[in-house]
Image: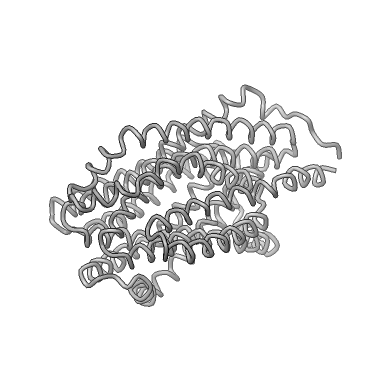
Amino acid sequence: MEMKESNPAFEGTWHNRVWRLAFPLILANLTIPLLGAVDTAVVGNLSAAHIGAVAVGSTVFSFLYWGLSFLRLSTTGLTAQAHGAGDNEAALTWLARAISLAVGFGILILLFQVPIVSATLTLFAPTPAVHIHVQDYIFIRIWGAPAALANIALLGWLIGLQRVKQALALQVVINGTNIFLDIALAQLLGMEVRGVALATMISQYVGIGAGFYLVIRLKDGLSARWNPRATFEQKQLLALMSMNRDIFLRNLCVIAAIAAFTIQGARMGELVLAANGILIIFQHFLAYGLDGFAHAAESLVGNAVGARDKGALRSAVKSSTQMAIVVALGYVGIFLLFGDTIIAMITDLPDVRTMTGEYFGWIIISPIISVWAFQLDGIFIGATRAKDMRNAMLISFFIYLLLMLNLVSDLGNHGLWLAFTMFMVARAVTLMALYPRLERAITVKAK
């Protein structure tokens, strides 16, 4: 078979195609850190212990959900490739497989909630004031696990099909409900940290209802029927689990890096923990915003791989990366101009604001350093190069741990942020080194 040089599905201006996909995804993604900011803000005027408790509790669920985010990543790549090959029935079947896995993992999390809380309190060793709030937060929010994981899989499927408006609608429903309930429960009803956790749990079940409604609406338009027998086909399930295993190990390193970051900050006291919790909100705004272009790359690269179109692959990579760099520079400007104002909106505690400002320089340089890792992640996800992603991340994580162990003792929290920054550099460099192999694989598969 000759490799295709062009495909009608990829006609048009590439920058326009990337923007049409990325813009709704940027809006959808930004609702997530906005929610994190609201979570922190509704307790931000109470005490550093309240802020720290939300930061620790959020890190725990980031560990759980990001560790299982292969449910989205693999679903996006496999769905995009099936869609690019014109097989919408296979695309629908990948969703059914992902939802089945999501619910199963959610039930396991519920069964192990007591050990999860015990491990959290042991690892983070919070102060007594933080301890009680963290415990309340986890025991309430954890009941949303099955719905939260199912929503992750649904979002991946929508992105793989390039149904970005629906993906935006789903995120707005989930996070809009969450923000409304945050204010109603945590502030108006005075439930504080427990209200934040309950708001998140309820919003996940609202989201899964909205998500299934979208699937029903889209199924007929795809002219595809769900085949229950195909969903549990052994060969496909084994292939999915193999890919998920590699992405899980990759994600585990990311979450372990963030958890180690939070643990080290917690050991430096409540003020540093609270300041880092606020700074991580900025990093989340950056990550989720730039991920709009990474998600666009996932979908376009997956379609190109499914269609075996190397020219489309290169165009998708080039255009999405160029646009991501421009937006990253915009983030630098926003952080420089409005950083102090945003910090003041999150908390009015003078000591916390001063401590946050001391380390804000790391956030200012983060966009131009982080954009490369985010973008390459999207490219490799779309190409379903899970083993390459795993190997690159293992190397990067090892470098991060070495730096953290050596820098924190001498430089304190500045050393911690330097190690984290170099972690992002290592992620980009290792994936760049593997990119030529990705292109060669398309040629080999197409012959």
For residue 156, side relative to residue 363 (left or right): right
Residue beneath the point at 36% across and 37% down: 335
Residue beneath the point at 61% across and 53% down: 227
For residue 266, side relative to residue 6 (left or right): left
Work out whether 235 lies above or below 363: below
Work out whether 6 lies above or below 298: above
Is residue 174 visible in this depiction of the protein? no
Residue placed furthest toward the left: 189
Work out whether 320 lies above or below 278: above
Residue beneath the point at 52% across and 48% down: 156
For residue 181, side relative to residue 369 (left or right): left
Work out whether 262 lies above or below 356: below
Q: Position of residue 304 (x, y in %)?
A: 69, 37
Q: Nearer the viewer, residue 233 or 433?
A: 433
Q: Which of 213 and 416 is in front in this view?
A: 416
Colouring rule applied to residues: one colour
Quadrant for residue 6, please give it.
top right
Is residue 172 visible in this depiction of the protein? yes
**In the rendered view of the protein, which quadrant contains the C terminus?**
top right
Q: Which of 354 and 323 is in front in this view?
A: 354
Q: Where is residue 331 in the image (x, y as percent from the top left)?
A: 42, 35
Quadrant for residue 360, please give it.
top left
Q: How many labels does the image show?
A: 0
Q: Position of residue 108 (x, y in %)?
A: 45, 71
